């Protein structure tokens, strides 16, 4: 749309998992999660929701205890909103500085010299603001072009794919042109941001007693911990593991580290990706490893899998194994990470012909 300042607005929607915003929201959040057949199929389709209700009821009490240990809710909404605000500011600054303008669709375009402006919003898959709540607001604002940017760096049908599927279902009811950015696992600025937090994490192992030591001389192992998925997804061609390895490959080109890969957060009776993070910790302890830096490689925001699973559960386990375990800071609103998201958006709108 063109506003009174002759600016055409492109909206960007940041897609993420979402998380309960209170202890009372835990059960309905779990119900929404387990109702998604793209993550796990609970018997025939007509039983999906009844079984999701049963599982969420059984798991809610235990899960509430986990959330109570990290403040009584997930911080993912506030963090994603902060990411959206930072990205919107960066995009609009870039549009102003470079005079990024809409590509002319015809010689008679009434605003051939107008600039673009950007509006960045947040859409969650399993808790508010749900994708289905956000798209009507975008339409109401008169926006005709939408970039959907998944905040999962590595694509999987169970993460980005599920969000895009829901988005497609909702947006089909509105006259909005949508382009989905499915993965950016090897984007140079994303890799640079990861390397930065890894370097800082490694430096945290230096104490006063070995202040003069070089990081390269410290016996610190880096453990990339990714969200687990059912093995059958990979067997059926899901690129998730390939892209995880692609991210690690780019990181290790820029920094020399001893590294390992494991998977966390599995649930259910199916075969999941392995080795699991807890199994890997025991394996490394048996090999005599005493310092481990965990990098939550498939997450860009703090939530229960970083704040509880890694910072509490795995840290306590590591202490019992005689391991000094630390975690890199999540990317959250890391300036280089925000620059990565900005570059991803701008590159794509130019390739689409939405800007020049």
Image (tube, grey):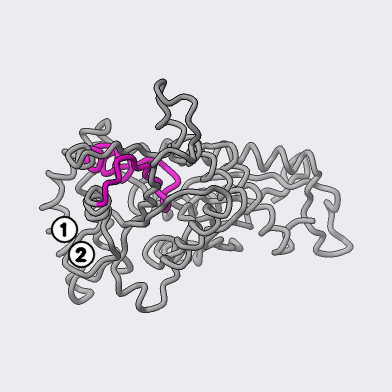
Q: Which mark is residue 53?
A: 1
Q: Relative to 141, is 23 on the left or the right?
A: left
Quadrant of the image for the C terminus? bottom right
Residue at position x 26%, y 51% from top?
287
Task: Name the side, left or right, on which 10 lies relative to 268.
Answer: right
Horizontal and vertical percent for residue 315? 25, 38
Q: Is residue 93 above or below residue 135?
A: above
Residue drawn at x 45%, y 70% is: 239
Magenta segment boundaries in residue numbering:
287-315
Q: Residue at x 36, y 73 (%)?
A: 234
Q: How far across and how far down the image is residue 243, in percent?
A: 48, 64
**Residue at the far right in the pictured view:** 107
User: How many circles with numbers are drawn on the protein?
Assistant: 2
Residue found at the far bottom of this picture: 236
Question: Cβ–Cβ below 8 Å for labels 2 and 1?
Answer: yes
For residue 49, which numbered disc appears in the image? 2
Q: How many angstroms separate mark 2 from mark 1 (CA)?
A: 6 Å
Which quadrant holds residue 202?
A: top left
Query: Which corner quadrant of the image does residue 283 belong to?
Result: bottom left
SS at badge 2:
helix
């Amino acid at each position: 749309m063109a506003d009174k300042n002759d600016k055409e607005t492109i909206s960007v929607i940041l897609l993420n998992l979402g998380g309960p915003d209170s202890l009372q929201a835990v059960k309905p959040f779990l119900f929404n999660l387990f109702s998604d057949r793209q993550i796990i199929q609970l018997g025939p389709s007509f039983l999906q929701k009844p079984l999701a209700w049963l599982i969420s009821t059984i798991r809610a009490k235990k899960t509430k205890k986990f959330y109570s240990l990290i403040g009584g809710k997930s911080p993912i909404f506030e963090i994603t909103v902060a990411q959206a605000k930072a990205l919107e500011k960066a995009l609009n600054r870039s549009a102003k500085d470079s005079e990024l303008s809409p590509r002319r669709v015809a010689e008679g375009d009434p605003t051939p010299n107008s600039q673009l402006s950007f509006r960045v919003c947040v859409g969650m898959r399993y808790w508010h603001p749900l994708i289905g709540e956000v798209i009507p607001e975008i339409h109401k604002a008169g926006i005709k072009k939408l970039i959907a940017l998944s905040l999962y760096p590595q694509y999987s049908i169970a993460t980005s794919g599920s969000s895009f599927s829901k988005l497609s279902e909702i947006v089909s009811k509105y006259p909005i042109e949508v382009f989905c950015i499915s993965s950016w696992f090897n984007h140079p600025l994303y890799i640079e941001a990861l390397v930065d937090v890894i370097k800082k994490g490694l430096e945290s192992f230096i104490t006063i007693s070995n202040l003069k030591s070089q990081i390269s001389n410290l016996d610190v192992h880096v453990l990339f911990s990714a969200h687990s998925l059912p093995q059958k997804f990979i067997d059926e061609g899901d690129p998730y593991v390939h892209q995880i390895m692609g991210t690690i490959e780019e990181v290790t080109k820029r920094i020399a580290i001893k590294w390992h890969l494991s998977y966390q957060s599995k649930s259910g009776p199916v075969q999941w990706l392995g080795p699991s993070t807890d199994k890997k910790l025991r394996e490394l302890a048996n090999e005599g490893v005493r310092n481990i830096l965990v990098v939550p490689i498939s997450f860009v925001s703090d939530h229960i899998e970083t704040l509880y699973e890694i910072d509490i559960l795995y840290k306590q386990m590591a202490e019992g194994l005689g391991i000094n375990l630390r975690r890199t800071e999540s990317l959250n609103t890391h300036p280089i990470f925000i620059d990565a998201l900005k570059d991803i958006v701008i590159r794509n709108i130019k390739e689409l012909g939405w800007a020049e």
